[in-house]
Image: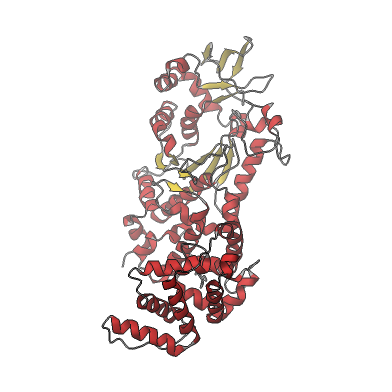
Amino acid sequence: MSTLRDAAMNSKAWPFEEARRVLKRYEKKAPEKGYVLFETGYGPSGLPHIGTFGEVARTTMIKKAFEVISDIPTKLICFSDDLDGMRKVPTNVPNQDMLREHEQKPLTSVPDPFEEFDSFGDHNNAMLRRFLDTFGFEYEFYSATDFYKSGRFDAVLRRAAEKYDEIMAVMLKSLREERQQSYSCFLPIHPETGRVLYVPMKEVNAKEGTITFDDEDGREWTLPVTGGNVKLQWKPDFGARWAALDVDFEMYGKDHSTNTPIYDRICEILGGKKPEHFTYELFLDANGEKISKSKGNGLSIDEWLTYASSESLGYFMFLKPKTAKRLWWDVIPKMMDEYHQQLRAYPTQSLEQQLNNPVWHIHGGNPPESKMVVPFSMLLNLASVAGASDKDGLWGFIKRYAPEATPETHPDLDQAAAFAVRYYHDFVAPERQFRLPSDSERAALLDLVAAMKSPEAALAQIARKNAEAGSDEALPEADFHSDDFLQTVVFAIGKNHGFENLRDWFKALYEVLLGQSQGPRFGGFIALYGVEETVGLIERALNGELVQG
């Protein structure tokens, strides 16, 4: 039997593949700094979005995988580029006019439009940290403002002045001709206006560690590159940060991928060793467009957590990171159900299978037991037909279906019930469209009612289906509390009424009874909602009451 480390060294799960690449950096000797450094970067120009969280979640998965295959200590930092100038005002925040007065100032010098923190940068940093803390991420938060002003970047900034021509040679190759004329890797912060200036340098004095430039009014200034007087343009800043901190791993979105050679080369020019990289595909909104902090399209972190568990979001992040994924409301129920399916499968799997299971990576190798005895999609349908206004309205049905379940013993189910009611009222109810059944569907529904009222009628439907199929299979025990028996009855009636493709029969059930084209395993739905209640629902549908609203 293989050990955990042996299995991890051969696992095909992408976090282990990435962790093995990082380990190769130190095959000959351990890092001089005493640990392997994983970094995530964040530009706080707008409110944090799920993509930002995804970088930390995925990097944490790789970090945890690394800790299985190596005894070298690890550290994860979240670095905020909050000294960056606010180039435009985000459209999804208040006090737009006030913010416009502070354009081009560092984000930590822009007043907080929400009037809660010392600056807009501090506000956005706090939002990110608050969310990361709720997930229990082990990380250290680094602020560019603190690093530049405290002197922690001074050494690499002086080196950048010494290597200015080499850095500029790298950068100028990547720029259009008109941009080359005014470009400098140094961005001075104006001593009077506080604005971040995009101006060419008149002189870079490596010996003195100073830059000389003319401001927008033509006045000449000379500033030291140290002490927070100057910041680096974002591309050189990437490489400088890697060199200054000795970063071993960083992931970023596909939109950065063409810049990777630039980041790497500048890191090397400044005396560093380029880190391992991982490029992930972008998240898309409902229209297939890239989600953006400034636009506020796509889902926010808080919005996801209003309707689903944090673990379901972690599951979404684990899946196929190199494939572009649509990040919209309708993915939430699927992620909730698939996460718990994987959680239920975990205890029965081999060690190799467990290491490939997303829940191992979501929970750092220690996944909990799933208590979701009712799938989330089923809870949504139950909320629909029960007209529940809160989770308590679902628990009466749940306890009849699973008598051993209580909110205290099944907290994940209790949480999911609340999510389901909220999700149903906000997204399902407004879109429901009931229809009347066709004549053939009406006949089948009447037989379904008769079968649910009488065990004899139910068994007769199964016997008829078996006879037409030439099967001599013994009839099951009639048990209206059993998902499987009820599903067999529904299936038999569909067959007996000539539905060649049973999808059409189930689609009819969903459209007539639930007002939607997709739905749950119907036998399980009947068992959860109740046989008598389902009979009443069908009779209301046959009478046209559901269409009338």
146 or 278: which is nearer to us?
A: 278
Residue 384: give x, y in percent of width and height: 57, 67
166 or 431: which is nearer to us?
A: 431
Residue 63 vs 87, above or below: the answer is: below
Residue 279: give x, y in percent of width and height: 40, 41
Q: In the figure, residue 87 lies in which quadrant?
A: top right
Horizontal placement of 27 versus 530: left or right? Answer: left
Residue 540: give x, y in percent of width and height: 56, 74
Residue 171 vs 442, above or below: the answer is: above
How many numbered circles does the render carry?
0
Q: In the figure, residue 98 lies in which quadrant?
A: top right
299 or 498: which is nearer to us?
A: 498
Residue 179: give x, y in percent of width and height: 47, 18
Q: How has the structure been colored for display?
A: secondary structure
Q: Seen from this angle, which residue lies furthest right? A: 115
Horizontal placement of 61 versus 464: left or right? Answer: right
Horizontal placement of 300 versus 4: left or right? Answer: right
Q: Seen from this angle, which residue lies furthest bottom? A: 456
515 or 66: which is nearer to us?
A: 515
- Quadrant (top left, top right, bottom left, bottom right) of the N terminus: bottom left
The residue sitting at 48% across, 67% down in the picture is 510
The residue sitting at 63% across, 29% down in the picture is 106
